[in-house]
Image: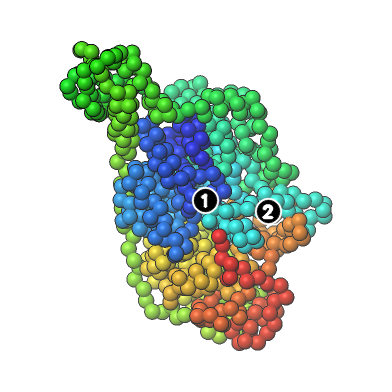
Amino acid sequence: MELLSPAGNFQSFIGALSAGCDAVYLGGARFGARAYADNFTEEEIVKAIKIAHINNVKVYLTVNTLIKEREYNEVIDYIRPLYEAGLDGCIVQDLGLIVRFKDLFPEMECHVSTQGFATGTESVKFYKSIGASRVVLARELSLSEIKAVKSEVDIEIETFIHGAMCYSYSGECLFSSCLGGRSGNRGRCAGPCRLPYKMLDDNSHEDKYLLSMKDQCTVGILPELIDAGIDSLKIEGRMKKPEYTAYVTSVYRKYIDLYSEHPEKFKIDDRDFDNLRHMYLRSEIGSGYYHTQNGRYMITLDSPAYNGNDDFLMKEVSDRFLSSVPKKAVSMFASLIRGEACSLTVTCEEQSVTAYGDVVSAPISRPLAEDDVIKQLSKLGDTSFIAEDIYVEMPEPAFLPVKALNDLRRNAITELTDAMSVKNPPLTSSVTIKAREHNDSFVQKPIVMVHTKEQYDVACSFDNIYVCVPSELLLKHDLKGDNIIAMLPDVIRIKDYGYVKNFLKQVCNNNCCAVYVRNLEGLNIVLEANVDINIVVGSEIYTANNASASFIASLSDAHVAPLELSQHELKECYDGNTYIYAYGKLPLMHTSNCVLKTSHGCMKHKGNAFVYIKDRTDTVFPVYRNCDICSNIIYNSVPTYLNDEIGSSKFSKERIVLSFTDESASMTKNILSLFLLKVGTAPDKFTKAYWKRGVE
């Protein structure tokens, strides 16, 4: 089992090594999900790889953002020199990179980031089939779900054990980018979940931090995590100080080793737990989702502020872990024989190298003293080594310039560093997924998404459209027809597999024309069911470049473009199977927690499916409660409206998505008339969202 530590800069990397990590994850200047961390230069990453490998520690590079088409070749050029330097693995979000990873970097591990939204065995099987060697599971998974994934799929599994928690499923949050252009999918999240909100019907007039998750601390349940067979336990925190990385790593190292060696003695020292609370954790902490699905006790309702830090502890940690590179003891044997090239053999553990230098001469005046040779050879500075034993063979008086001795030492240490930093053979994985056979039954025409029966009835009064109906609405009213696209849930967990598979059967029995999938769980279930039905892939499965778009097109009959692309970026990877989101309140968050349960307690299937939260500016956001699967979707306050833009662009009005959430029947009819019949009134308030600006 691996203890995986964050390194936001080189000093954090040194702290992680000194504190006993098994692997570190770090980011370079680009393509990482922590764009505002200090991050590493290419030279620092290469140096870190060598130092880490000498200490039997692996290095993983975060490339866990969506890659735009114009960046695709750049990211490959960015990774390649690090791959050649011995990088152990990349943590990747983008499907377009994952599907080509084994062709591009055959000797390196591909780890699917938690932004890959893996919530069960089906998505993990899918990722394995396209070449992933490890999957970082969604943080929302319970311990029992993790055990099920581990037992059913032969692949490495990684989970988070400590640090900050997102309210939304990672990779499925557009809140920051929609409101301010800073995209979490591009490493620039502004953290709107850490702001206060209140329920619209709450008469207390008191703002609460309804979306702010408690920080995670699982040191107390480490035995359960170890026994579950998790392959890598990951500490969050590349944005935090080196002292945080070092101390948190040291505590988890201590208790992992304690449980592994003396399980009967496992008990957390109160001082260790208290110190963890004072290392950049929020005022309230919890163990995350390992034993709970959601609830008020998981939220920092009163304040998401960090606890103060203990200055004495910070200095103690700095002195102990951050003062120097971890050192390995070496023995040296120098041969200084007159008339022969000098040589230096350096041995560390089971590795030995010999370097040769200038020819040793007879002394003209003062001969070399053995103590002087030892003094020069022991100057190993900021290398990863310290000289433990130095032997000098010099049978007769001899001379060698100090510069020649220093060069000999440097060359020998460089050779030893290179020899010891060779990485272990990578995990083997293969690509097995095959393209799906298509039929011609899916005709291109607008897709109208509805949430209510009233909206459905209005949509059915229009001709030549598809009506996309969520599973809960279709099942409740037993809707049928060859114009219906049946929409699978936005989140699918293992507990939902029976629900989804039964729904899929009913979809086929009801003569629906297609199934709409919003995650890789649903896509893999449909693909493996081998049912004779068209597949439409939603915008939540990101196709931000041609590689990802082509791959998804090979598995589906149509797909919806990602919402964060500008019109120019859409053109770069737009094809005949691509739909554009032209109207609707954008889904900002897909969540396991429920805002109504947090504020009022669970009201499963009671009242309106929509509730509303209000921010400090009195902006109101609809929240859709899907009680069938116990999840929420938080929507934008105003709809995206691109009627004029689509009409004046190259994009066809036959390939648009019109999405209705909490609109009334009359509002639904008006919008459909505008887009389909060119009559009606534009919404009073709307946004063009990403059409012009995209995201950074």
Residue 602: x %, y % from top left = 68, 51
Q: Depth check: give the residue in front, 478 or 666.
A: 666
Q: Tell us which disc is closer to us: 1 or 2.
A: 1
Mark 1 lies on residue: 33
- The residue sitting at 44% across, 41% down in the picture is 44
Mark 2 lies on residue: 595
| Contact between labelled residues 2 and 1, with CB atoms less than 8 Å apart | no
Position of 287 with respect to 602 (left or right) is left
Dot 2, how many residues are within 10 Å of its Cα: few (below 14), some (14-19), or many (20+)? many
Q: Is residue 462 above or below residue 230?
A: below
Real-space Cα separation, disc 1 to disc 2, in angstroms: 26 Å
Three-letter amino acid code at disc 2? Answer: Val
- The residue sitting at 31% across, 35% down in the picture is 418
Position of 322 with respect to 376 (left or right) is right
Residue 649: x %, y % from top left = 53, 80
Q: Quadrant of residue 527?
A: bottom left
